[in-house]
Image (tube, helix red, strand yellow):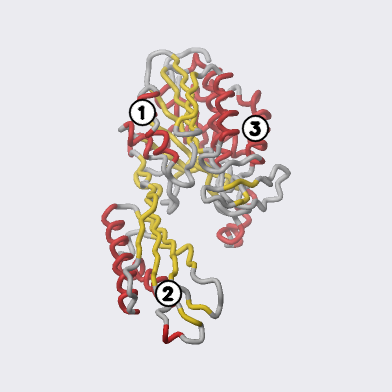
């Protein structure tokens, strides 16, 4: 039997569970939870895995869940989905839109929404897990369904690993993951080698000297210094990095003062740097420090600036051979709906898990925009303006065919390793 025959044998039960999966997705979308707060989500995931016959390990790293389904001798495949939502107020108009709120890690009350599509990832993995459990005659080996908390703050994978994940489950031979992105629903896109960037988060505090707004000569104005830093940092990418080397530098927050007629004592800047290789990363981070210190020196500050590096996201670099295998499986399964995807400047912590196991992996894009809407925007040349992207208050995957495609993609990837090539019945 071909790989497509094996995929068809497992996917044959999708019609029977589609409505249930759609209801689960709508409920999950309406009940989002921030990173490390995914208690409701994790409980529901764990129960459904147990109902399918999985051995379940929960509470890993706080709210992480892993289901283990052993099905004879053979390879072990790890599938991963992230569970957390964002502090975003949803503006999609969906009948199941989130109205939830929560207290974030800093104690603030914030709105919460699945504005990145992790609810779709969870539902797709549950669907794939259930279908694999129901069609055990079509494959052989062990399947690990891993549901990870706190991808957005960047420490969910690390916490699962620190809690003994590597020793808790069978050692996988390969790992797979997917992410919804603003491409036409029904499409899947692979990319060998570099796929997602590394990301470094930096907090900068500039110390000046406060004074009355009417007496600037008595002050060292940190607002002016911060403004010069913002402008000068833009020259790192435009003047210090080769045009052929992709790097993104964003100053996402500048905060200083509370009144228009008071020059404050200090200013805080939050900077995000995205890069794809270690040489570029080191150069950009060093340049940030150089520019910040030079601007402070030029203004005569009495104190050195504080430059604090926060959580870093690793790069996602897909294994060449594994990606070729999965790409071939997608072509066999989806035909023209399977293709390649361009380099992405988003970041993920998924790769920390396969890296900890020292195994290869591949991570692919799952389209989630209504195809007609996307094509109309493309014809107008307004995709960037009209198609909401991840983290937008208006971002939400179209339910179908995104859900069906995501379930099938996980199954097809798994069966590149687990399929019984010579089985004669499902």
N-term-proximal mark, 1 vs 3: 3
Q: Nearer the viewer, residue 413 or 313?
A: 313
* Numbered badge on residue 222: 2
N-term-proximal mark, 1 vs 2: 1
Secondary element at tag 2: helix
Is residue 281 in view?
yes
Left/right of residue 418 with respect to residue 86 in the rendered view:
left
- The residue carrying pointer 1 sits among few (fewer than 14), some (14 to 19) or many (20 or more) residues within 10 Å by Cα, namely some
N-term-proximal mark, 2 vs 3: 3
Q: Residue at x 68, y 45 (%)?
A: 97
Q: Marks 2/3: CA distance?
A: 50 Å
* Numbered badge on residue 271: none
Secondary element at tag 1: helix
Q: Residue at x 57, y 58 (%)?
A: 383
Q: Are marks 1 and 2 in contact (CB under 8 Å)?
A: no
Q: Marks 1/3: CA distance?
A: 30 Å
The residue beneath circle 1 is 166
Residue 176 in percent (x, y) is at: 43, 34
The residue beneath circle 3 is 24
Q: Nearer the viewer, residue 94 or 100?
A: 100
Secondary element at tag 3: helix
Instruction: Judge whether 140 appears above or below 238 on screen.
Output: above
């Amino acid at each position: 039997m071909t790989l497509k025959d094996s995929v068809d044998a497992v996917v044959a039960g999708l019609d029977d569970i589609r409505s249930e999966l759609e209801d689960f997705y709508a409920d999950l979308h309406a009940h989002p939870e921030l990173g490390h707060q995914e208690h409701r989500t994790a409980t529901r995931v764990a129960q459904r895995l147990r109902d399918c016959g999985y051995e379940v390990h929960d509470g890993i790293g706080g709210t992480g869940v892993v289901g283990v389904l052993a099905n004879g001798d053979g390879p072990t495949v790890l599938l991963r989905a992230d569970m957390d939502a964002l502090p975003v107020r949803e503006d999609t108009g969906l009948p199941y839109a989130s109205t939830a709120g929560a207290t974030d890690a800093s104690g603030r009350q914030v709105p919460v929404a699945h504005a990145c599509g992790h609810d779709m990832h969870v539902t797709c993995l549950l669907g794939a897990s259930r279908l694999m459990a129901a069609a055990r005659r079509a494959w052989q080996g062990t399947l690990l369904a891993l549901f990870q908390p706190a991808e957005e703050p960047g420490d969910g994978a690390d916490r699962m690993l620190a809690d003994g994940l590597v020793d808790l489950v069978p050692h996988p031979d390969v790992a797979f993951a997917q992410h919804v992105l603003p491409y036409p629903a029904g499409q899947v896109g692979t990319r060998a080698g570099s796929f997602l960037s590394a990301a470094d988060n930096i907090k900068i505090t500039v110390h000046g000297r406060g004074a009355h707004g009417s007496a600037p000569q008595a002050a060292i104005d940190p607002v002016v210094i911060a403004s010069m830093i913002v402008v000068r940092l833009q020259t790192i990418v435009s003047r210090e990095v080769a045009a052929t080397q992709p790097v993104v530098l964003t100053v996402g927050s500048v905060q200083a003062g509370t009144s228009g007629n008071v020059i404050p004592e200090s200013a805080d800047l939050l900077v995000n740097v995205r890069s794809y290789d270690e040489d570029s990363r080191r150069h950009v981070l060093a340049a940030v420090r150089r520019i910040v210190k030079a601007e402070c020196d030029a203004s005569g500050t009495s104190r050195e600036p504080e430059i604090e590096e926060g959580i870093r996201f690793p790069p996602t670099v897909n294994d060449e051979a594994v990606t070729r295998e999965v790409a071939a499986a997608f072509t066999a399964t989806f035909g023209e709906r399977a293709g390649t995807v361009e380099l992405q400047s988003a970041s993920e912590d998924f790769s920390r898990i396969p890296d900890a196991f020292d195994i290869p992996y591949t991570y692919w894009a799952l389209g989630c925009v209504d195809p007609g809407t996307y094509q109309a925007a493309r014809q107008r040349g307004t995709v960037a303006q009209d198609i909401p992207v991840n983290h937008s208050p208006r971002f939400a995957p179209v339910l179908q065919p995104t859900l069906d495609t995501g379930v099938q993609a996980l199954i097809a990837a798994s069966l590149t390793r687990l399929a019984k090539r010579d089985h004669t019945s499902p």
